[in-house]
Amino acid sequence: MKTKIKRLRKEKRISQEMLAKAVGVTRQTITSIENEKYTASLLLAHKIAKYFDLTIEEVFDLNNIGEEE
Amino acid sequence: MRDKFELKVKKDLIFIALVILLIPCMMIIMNTFFGEFVIDDNFSGFIWALVISSEVILFYYLVTWSIALRNESRMEILFIKSNDERNKFIKKETAINTVVTFVIFMIFALIWFAYKNALVFEVLFYILNVFIWIFIIFKVKYKNTF
């Protein structure tokens, strides 16, 4: 699933480590989500979106989920 | 949730400490009552390697978790690692809990049959080898995929 996490992190100058700690996951999980290897759960997606003060739709591209699978 | 996790770590520590003590105890008991190994030198070398390596691995976890119980930041890291959803997913897919239980059971079974029956020991030895290779392949596959 495509996400804007990397771009948002760069804009706000936040490291993967900081984001990971804030949402309660490991840095590797953030890397996997950014590289589109792992799809975050609804709860994690919500936590990440909340961290950036955005909605889930604004952070994650939900348009072509069905196509990916 | 954090309190429950700390309690779980404490319980796991007791279990690990028991296994660390039980493995050499079993070796001593078997040696006392059944004498020498019934397996050849190569296999007995494997048994010693298995016992020593499992003791080292278990001791590593014992020390790491004991330190985490006394150190807040280490406990936080351990808590995040244990509750990380990707880690949980990989653990579920590779069935790591079943693998650990199976390996612990196999260690005791291999020690037992090393003194009792060479043929059964060899069969268990090959089963364990196949099992470990399948587990390693699965682990690498899922770590790279997700």
Image (cartoon, rainbow, N blue to C red):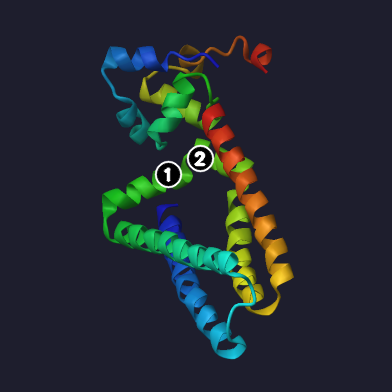
Q: Quadrant where the N terminus of chain A lies?
A: top right
What residue sits 28% from the left and 22% below the top?
Answer: A14
Front-most of residues A41 and B132: B132
What residue sits 64% from the left and 14% below the top?
Answer: A68
Residue B146 appearing in the image: no
Labels 1 & 2 near each other (Cβ < 8 A): yes
Residue A5, given in percent of the width and then of the height, sits at 41, 17
Q: Chain of mark 1?
A: B
Judged left or right of residue B64, residue A64 is right
Residue B16, given in percent of the width and then of the height, sits at 46, 67
Residue A36, given in percent of the width and then of the height, sits at 51, 19
Residue B93 appearing in the image: yes
Residue at the outermost bottom position:
B33
Say which element carries label 2. Answer: helix
Q: Which residue is mark 2?
A: B87
N-terminal of the pair, mark 1 or mark 2, is: 1
Judged left or right of residue B40, residue B12 is left
